[in-house]
Image (cartoon, rainbow, N blue to C red):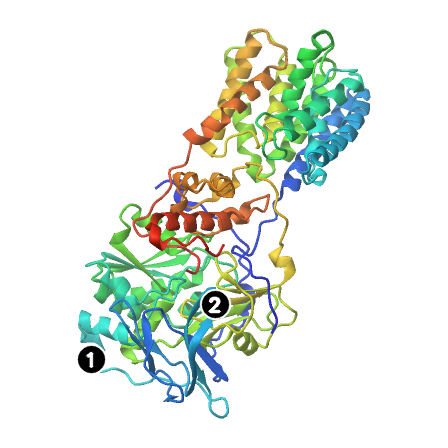
Amino acid sequence: MNTHLKTLSPHIRSRDSVAKRYWGLTLASVPVFVAVILGGQAGALRVLLFSIISAVAFDFLGAKILFKKERVNNGEAVLSATLLTLLLPRNCPFEIAVFGIFLAVFVVKELFGGTGSYLFHPVLAARIFLQMSFPGFFENSGMILEEKSALWILGGLLVSGVAVISQKNNREIPLFYIMISLLCVLLFHSGMESLTVLNWIFFTAFFLLGDSVAMPLTRKGTRIFVLGAALLNFFFEAKGFSMAAAGYAILLMNALTPWLDVMMKPAAYRAKIHLKATYP
Amino acid sequence: MSTRNFVGIRLERKKEASLLNWNLKRPYTPERVRISLPATAYPCVHVGNNVQTGQKIADPVGPGCATVHSSMEGVIEKIAIFPDATGGESMTVEVRRQGDPKAPATFENVRKNWEILKEEELLDIFQNSGIVTTDALMQPVHAKIKKNEQHPTLIINGCEPEPYVTCEQVLAMAHPLEILKGAEILKKTTRANQILFVFEDCNLELVELFKSKIYFLKWEHVKVRTVPAVYPQGHETTLLQRWFSGKEDQAIVFPASTAFAVYEAVVHQKPFYERVLTVGGECVIEPRSLWLPLGISFRDAIHTCKGVMREPQKVIMGGPMAGTAQENLEVSVMAGTNAILALPKEVIRDKAEEPCIRCGACVDMCPVSLSPAMITLAAEHGEFELAEKWDVSACIECGNCSYVCPSKRPMLKWIRKAQAEMAQTALPKSQKNHEYAS
């Protein structure tokens, strides 16, 4: 008598996976790095290298210290390193990058429960902590995404955007964010450099809002999240905040996520005759 | 009508292989059949009795049950409790063939005056021919009809949203007139005003065939409608949700093959002892839809289709989304078995579970608007009452959430566990039993 696997339905699974999502987003950032190099900031690559190595190391060690299964393969650590590198100032010493990675990967992510459990976007939380720790350095040096090579980076971001939006399941959030932000900028523009503003809008839309963990589950909730993030971002910028405005906006909305999840609970369809698809 | 009603996944349909062998064959009788009886039927034969094809072998105990008929000519070998294909155990009558394989019996006698039979007579015929619905629930047809005084709309469901499964499609292509007449008989008993035939929009030839037949019959109360070919659109619940949301008791749904069984029972006096089912999957040499007697073992059924070309990792009763995996192949075909699938390793794609990344894909894909991610998290931490607050009891167990999950989480397992736990707490204390199968 041959025995076969006896597991519960469904017996087929989609090809989607966590690793695909994270590595996909990491790959989508390659055009931005190409643009960074073409814009004359090849030094960023050194920071990227240190960030990636330290992110993988902190992810692995953090999981080992906390007796958890290490999940370096799913690409989350590398994605965090990539995003943090792009959020740092030009000519940033690599010690600051490594410290930021420690904050993002170990403190904000791993100590709050690891993949899927953290409350705040790790990269943004780390970036803002860095800014508060080294205010002088962050205010006096321009960001990688700003000023000098902004046009190159806009091109890179647009190519990345096409890559991100070509995937069906993450189309809605970036487009919605871009729409609201552009509307805000057009209506109440307050003397900001337009190219930099565009860069930040696109970067936030394609990369920073690509982390679903600290965002609401439902479509409605996500829309409110995105709307809130865009409006808060614009409000902070208008009041003279630095480019961490997007970060503060998203972190504030992160804090609202559990509430949004409960408030935007979908109304279940309850039939008078309740029938199941499976065998009894 | 909001777009929420059209939620579904466009699965790979994989129906071509079994549609290549499109003629419905009836194989010779197998060596033995094991006919499992419903809990409310009691066997009326004894070990050693000779039975004919279609002879009654079990009587209904209550009014809500139908008779059971032998699917083969032979001798009663055993009446015992055997594991059945749904995962439980049931009283089973084993019939063994005497001598060589024989051609299956045929029922050609046309019942006199079948067109002027009254409602009660028809319902009696349904009960005494043992007709049950040919979907997963296997309700006796007369009991399902009697639940309500009148059903204004009768829906004949010819949809098969599950991959691989083609039995309804092949049967409807081969016997459209019989199904139409069966639907007309069902209309009389359900006192319906109109009949809706529902097909998937990709089965255009089926839609056109039925439209042309209805046109020539000049039946204006019969309409053909289509649903998108996405899973689970086409299941009974989603059909009711689509057109009768909030007034589900206004309509009654029967699969097309049930309408065919009704036609044969009423017109040809043939009890319900065989059904069309698909034997398929990548591992089967000649995947096809064919007539098989109820009670034939899965091993014999696959053997009838020339066996397997390589060892399957899973053998499933029903479709791959909502079917039940089988440990061994000695279990037998039941009235609700629409497919036997032998699937290889690369189709199953079993992967390790990862933490939820809250991507919301399960919420987007739930046909009844639940939040499976939240329910699963609650159930995992033993908070079953919290799971109920998130409407776990409204789940129809279609399996969409587990299918789309990028973290490969076994959502449906936790949902079922939460439902079982809630059913336990609903019972009075004396009946509580904390050991349930997960």
Badge 1 sits on which subunit? B
Q: Residue at x 52, y 27 (%)?
A: A176
Q: Secondary structure at mark 2?
A: loop
Nearest to the observer: residue A123 or residue B265: A123
Which kind of residue does numbered mark 2 sit on? Ala
Which of the 4 image quarters holds residue B307? bottom right
**In the image, is B269 to the left or to the right of A59?**
left
Q: Position of residue A40 (x, y in %)?
A: 80, 19
Question: Residue B171 has which mark?
Answer: none
- Can you say which quadrant of the picture contains the N terminus of chain A? bottom right
| Residue that badge 1 annotates | B113
Single out the mark in the foreground, 2 or 1: 2
Q: Mark 1 is on which residue type?
A: Asn
Which of marks 1 and 2 precedes in the sequence? 2
**Closest to the observer, B258 or B40:** B40
Image quadrant of residue A178?
top right
> Viewed as shown, does residue B140 lie left or right of B89?
left
Q: Residue at x 44, y 60 (%)?
A: B160
Q: Position of residue A214 (x, y in %)?
A: 56, 29
Badge 2 crowding class, 10 Å Cα cut-off, few under 14, some 14 to 19, many 20 or more, is many
Query: Considering only vertical position in the picture, is B110 above or below B352?
Result: below
B218 and A42: which is toward the camera = A42
CA distance for labels 2 and 1: 39 Å
Q: Is residue A17 left or right of residue B332?
A: right
Label disc, if present, on residue B85 of the rendered structure = 2
Residue B335 image point, x, y percent: 40, 70
Tell me if I can see residue A71 in this picture. Answer: yes
